[in-house]
Image (cartoon, helix red, strand yellow):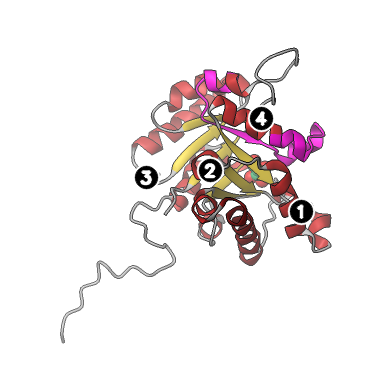
Amino acid sequence: MTTPLIAGNWKMNGMLRSLTELKGIADAVKDGRTEGCEIVICPPATMLSASRGILHNVAKVGGQDCHSEAKGAHTGDIAAEMLKDVGASFVIVGHSERRADHAESDEIVKAKVNAAWRAGLVPILCIGETQGERDEGKTLDRLGEQLAGCVPSGARGDRLVVAYEPIWAIGTGRTPSSGEVAEAHAFIRKTLTDRFGRETGEAIRLLYGGSVNPGNALELLHIDNVDGALVGGASLKAADFIAICEHAARPDGRDPFEPDFSDLEIGLE
Ligand SMILES: O=C[C@H](O)COP(=O)(O)O
């Protein structure tokens, strides 16, 4: 069984005073409340170093984007190597907000995956369909295109995470049905397995993202082929984020939907 991964994407939110939320996350992890769950927080770049200081040995930190080149004249951009330099372990690439705001094509995103690998970071590659694509029944076609266009050869289970984020579910409070999530994740798994072989395809962690909150996390996180979540808004508050992580934590490997009769004493009448 793979270790579930819960990634918090703070997007363009967070000031130094928000470090108190990270302290809350660190305390909960130290208390053992998230045992069996790997955690990464992707704060704005301005907070990476301080975040790493607070979460050191407790949770990992990641960038929200990187440039495809290692250095150079790219004002305002950040190289994967720079993220690594301040202690990042992961980097989000291909988020739909980057694709929309910065016209990032699949080709650019693929170059960023390669840049992350070059720097020794694990990319969290985001893919997902628009509402229009879903309405037209083109969701799986779109996911297939993005996987083909963004995942370079050389993928391995320990160096790639794929996040399925239906664009229409991001920040809207709407989520796909369990069946829709299961269908998308099964398709992503099969696509990766067909291309990279069973061992690699099954080891690449697949996250669901889009309006995950403490109230829906348990159901979403226990759908087949869902190995964790990419959480936006609900990652900004330690209590909400930890509640989501607790739903993912499976220290004993027990399925939470299975009834637990282990403490029941049945005597002969
Ligand atoms: O990266 C995170 C996703 O865009 C989801 O954001 P959200 O949880 O606020 O919907």
Identify residue for label 2.
156
Q: Nearer the viewer, residue 20 or 258?
A: 258
Secondary structure of the residue carrying tag 1 is helix
Dot 3 and dot 1 residues touching (CB under 8 Å):
no
Identify residue for label 4.
65
Dot 2 and dot 3 residues touching (CB under 8 Å):
no
Q: Mark 1 to mark 2: distance in Å?
A: 22 Å
Identify residue for label 3.
35
Number of other residues with Cα within 10 Å of mark 2, as a class: few under 14, some 14 to 19, many 20 or more: some
- Looking at marks 3 and 4 on the same chain, the residue that comes earlier in the sequence is marked by 3
- Looking at marks 3 and 1 on the same chain, the residue that comes earlier in the sequence is marked by 3
Number of other residues with Cα within 10 Å of mark 1, as a class: few under 14, some 14 to 19, many 20 or more: some
Type of the residue with mark 4: Asp
Q: Residue at x 82, y 34 (%)?
A: 103
- Looking at marks 1 and 4 on the same chain, the residue that comes earlier in the sequence is marked by 4
Residue numbers of the magenta segment: 82-110
Q: Mark 4 to mark 2: distance in Å?
A: 20 Å
* Image depth: mark 4 or mark 2 in front: 2
Q: Mark 3 to mark 1: distance in Å?
A: 35 Å
